[in-house]
Image (spheres, rainbow, N blue to C red):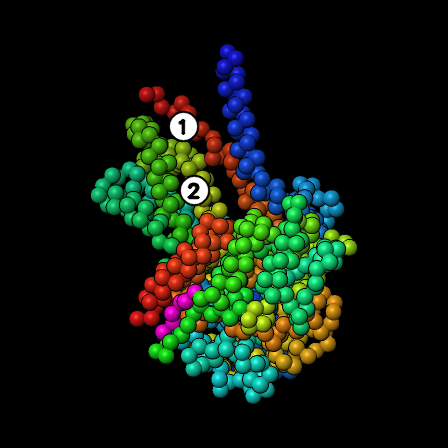
């Protein structure tokens, strides 16, 4: 008797939860997988979907909440299984495999001229792989210095602006001046040291990945590539103006020390301002400063957030129309405000809401023109080089365990061996 | 005598240290869940929030369908545990009692099967489930969890069955009990702690599992707790710490309650004094 009851319960359990199946009422339903996660951002995305659905009864969009955690594997499985969402939110540095693998639609002929013209060429480069464009870059964030304004004022140092930024040498001198008595001029959160180093190195003309006429990529580590790593290394190990303990931390982990007066500055992504607004003690005066400039000015690499369309989607035109709606200038502003990031669209960047001094939006907006495609994001084999070679090598260099020569040797010699396997 | 007392005190001290070590993450989670954002950014954090708040819980419930996710997780985990035990128990009995080449091969296969990582099996698994129309369904997820937990559950149960002395079954047979009667009245009660422990293992495995649920469930209303928890985490690991801690604290409660209720079953010495050697 008991066994029968158990079997009945199990059957109920299994049948009660089975999928309801799809509707067939003639209208098109597009699935939009969004990775928005902050409350304001999720609300902005859902509102836009609602607005679209209200005026497009024949093309409905279903909002699907995705997650940044594991998104690559989740998408890969969905692509392989033929169950991918029609519209895919991701980041440009995650697209290379999908683009080359034929999972994403080439958007070149799908997007409106308005959208193509609104987003600058340097941003389109972040999503261009081979001859195709596989995503629309729409949100980006520069790495900035978030500074304790009171500390800087009391020290009497020159405060940099986007028009007159610090040089890397000046930045090093300032951090040394601000340090002492267990306090540090800067705390570098370098849990992920590779993207930070490569992106900031664009300012000094660093490239590291050089594509030859045959299309093959070779790694070199020239003097221009060494400016940023050497500055960090010297700050930590020679000047003692950067805290060694934060090298293994993520950005959020450094905030308590920043608020507690242990570090004068922290290099962070522009969107960290939201956390700072939420967590800073009352009366704590902070400000956003541009990252130091080098031979190439304030240039730095970014991997914008993107919207792509699945190659398997039977409704690519309609999906492109939805993306065009989502990324109208006024909507791009809403998305940017929700995520505390910068839009890529030139029209959106002119919006007064993004040029206000409040929370230093204006400083970030002034940096937008200097943002470039993150180096190497389209290089096949880059993820392996990053994980197996560059991350440990840079971590050891920054902590003082190895010198610049060994760093160069490992990044270049070991690195080129890795790339060679992908370029046969 | 003094040495023995010192040794005993040392044992208790070590036990206490171990308990603190085990409890630390949970207590920290509890503390974080009740802290306002400004306290989360403090350089000198305190165990007891200075200005405790329920705002994190409110925000967590406002932003994410936690109750739905809790229900889905419970269905998936309980379903997986029940089905895994129902399949594993008779199999384990046969493998333990019939020592043939086949049972040895089965045991070896169980061990080998543990070596496959998630990423290796997920795409073929996805395609199989798609053909069975079990993508985006909790029963499909339960099936995966059962398959994933079954080898280790089987391995555990084989050990428990072997610990039940065959002499007891032989004694029952001598007393006139049939095979079914022996299994139900003699073997099953002695195996109960092992079955409960195995069920708990399958339950916890399914309860905590993230990747399969992420890939296999698409509809928001079907997502399980581990997947929903990641919605408080952004790119590069940036997290909305307060609501995340509140939601994670709530997510640990059901498994804690189940452990508290069942633990006596696991630790009960059913075999004590059953056989004179």
Q: Position of residue B145 (x, y in %)?
A: 43, 53
Q: Which quarter of the figure has residue B195?
A: top left
Q: Quadrant of the C terminus of chain A?
A: bottom left
Q: Quadrant of the N terminus of chain A?
A: top left
Element carrying mark 1: loop
Instruction: Report the Cα–Cα distance between label 2 and label 1.
Output: 18 Å
Residues packed near mark 1 inside 10 Å, few (<14), some (14 to 19) or many (20 plus): few
Q: Which residue is mark 1?
A: B271
Residue drawn at 64 percent across, 45 percent down = A182
Q: Please report the bounds of the magenta region as a residue range.
A: A216-221
Q: Which residue is mark 2?
A: B198
Q: Residue furthest top?
A: B1
Q: Is residue A86 visible?
A: no
Q: Residue furthest right?
A: A283
Instruction: Count the marks.
Output: 2
Q: Residue furthest left?
A: B101
Element carrying mark 2: helix
Q: Which quarter of the figure has residue B134?
A: bottom left
The residue nearer to you, when weighing B33 against A113, is A113
Q: In this rendering, is residue B219 above or below B152?
A: below
The residue nearer to you, when weighing A38 against A19, is A38
């Amino acid at each position: 008797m008991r066994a029968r009851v158990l079997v009945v319960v199990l059957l109920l359990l299994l049948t009660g939860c089975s999928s309801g199946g799809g509707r067939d009422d003639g209208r098109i339903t597009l699935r939009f997988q969004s990775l928005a996660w902050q409350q304001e951002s999720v609300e902005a995305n859902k509102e836009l979907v609602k607005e679209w659905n209200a005026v497009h009864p024949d093309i409905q969009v279903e909002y699907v909440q995705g997650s940044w955690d594991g998104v690559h594997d989740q998408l890969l499985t969905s692509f392989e299984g033929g169950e991918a969402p029609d519209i895919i939110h991701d980041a440009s540095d995650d697209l290379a495999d999908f683009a080359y693998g034929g999972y994403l639609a080439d958007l070149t002929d799908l997007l409106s001229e308005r959208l193509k013209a609104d987003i600058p060429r340097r941003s389109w480069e972040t999503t261009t792989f081979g001859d195709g464009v596989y995503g629309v870059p729409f949100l980006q964030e520069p790495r900035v210095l978030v500074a304790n304004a009171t500390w800087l004022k009391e020290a009497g140092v020159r405060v940099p602006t986007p028009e007159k930024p610090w040089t890397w040498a000046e930045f090093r001198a300032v951090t040394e001046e601000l340090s002492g008595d267990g306090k540090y001029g800067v705390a570098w959160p370098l849990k992920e040291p590779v993207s930070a180093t490569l992106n900031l190195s664009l300012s000094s003309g660093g490239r590291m990945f050089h594509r030859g006429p045959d299309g093959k990529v070779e790694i070199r580590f020239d003097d221009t590539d060494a400016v940023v790593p050497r500055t960090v290394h010297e700050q930590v190990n020679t000047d003692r103006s950067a805290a060694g303990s934060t090298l293994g931390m993520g950005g959020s982990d450094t905030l308590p020390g920043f608020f507690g007066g242990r570090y004068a500055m922290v290099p962070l992504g522009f969107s960290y301002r939201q956390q700072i607004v939420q967590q800073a003690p009352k009366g704590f005066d902070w400000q956003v400063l541009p990252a130091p400039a080098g031979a190439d000015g304030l240039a730095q690499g970014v991997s914008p957030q993107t919207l792509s369309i699945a190659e398997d989607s039977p409704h690519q035109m309609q999906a492109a129309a939805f993306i065009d709606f989502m990324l109208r200038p006024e909507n791009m502003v809403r998305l940017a405000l929700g995520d505390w990031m910068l839009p890529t669209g030139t029209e959106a960047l002119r919006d007064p809401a993004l040029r206000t001094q409040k929370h230093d939006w204006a400083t970030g907006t002034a940096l937008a023109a200097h943002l470039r495609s993150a180096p190497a994001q389209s290089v096949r084999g880059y993820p392996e080089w990053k994980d197996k070679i560059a991350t440990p090598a840079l971590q050891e260099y920054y902590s003082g365990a190895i010198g610049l020569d060994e760093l160069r040797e490992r990044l270049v010699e070991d690195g080129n061996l890795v790339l060679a396997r992908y370029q046969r | 005598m003094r040495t023995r007392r010192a040794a005993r005190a040392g044992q208790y001290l070590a036990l206490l240290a171990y308990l603190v070590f085990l409890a630390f993450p949970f207590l920290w989670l509890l503390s974080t869940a009740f802290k306002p954002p400004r306290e989360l950014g403090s350089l000198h954090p305190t165990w007891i929030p200075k200005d405790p708040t329920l705002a994190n819980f409110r925000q967590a419930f406002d932003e994410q369908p936690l109750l739905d996710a809790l229900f889905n997780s419970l269905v998936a985990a309980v379903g997986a545990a029940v089905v895994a035990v129902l399949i594993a128990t008779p199999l384990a009995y046969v493998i333990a009692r019939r020592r043939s080449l086949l049972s040895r091969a089965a045991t070896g296969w169980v061990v080998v099967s543990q070596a496959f990582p998630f990423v290796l099996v997920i795409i073929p698994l996805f395609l199989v489930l798609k053909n069975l129309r079990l993508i985006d369904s909790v029963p499909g997820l339960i099936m995966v969890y059962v398959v994933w937990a079954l080898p280790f559950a089987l391995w555990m149960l084989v050990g428990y069955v072997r610990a039940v002395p065959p002499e007891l079954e032989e004694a029952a047979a001598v007393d006139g009990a049939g095979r079914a009667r022996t299994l139900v009245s003699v073997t099953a009660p002695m195996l109960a702690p092992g079955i409960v422990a195995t069920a708990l293992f399958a339950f916890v495995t399914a309860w905590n599992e993230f990747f399969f649920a992420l890939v296999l469930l698409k509809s928001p209303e079907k997502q399980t707790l581990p997947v929903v928890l990641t919605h408080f985490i952004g790119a590069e690991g940036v997290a909305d710490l307060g609501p995340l801690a509140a939601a994670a604290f709530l997510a640990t409660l059901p498994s804690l309650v189940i452990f508290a209720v069942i633990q006596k079953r696991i630790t009960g010495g059913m075999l004590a004094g059953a056989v004179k050697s």
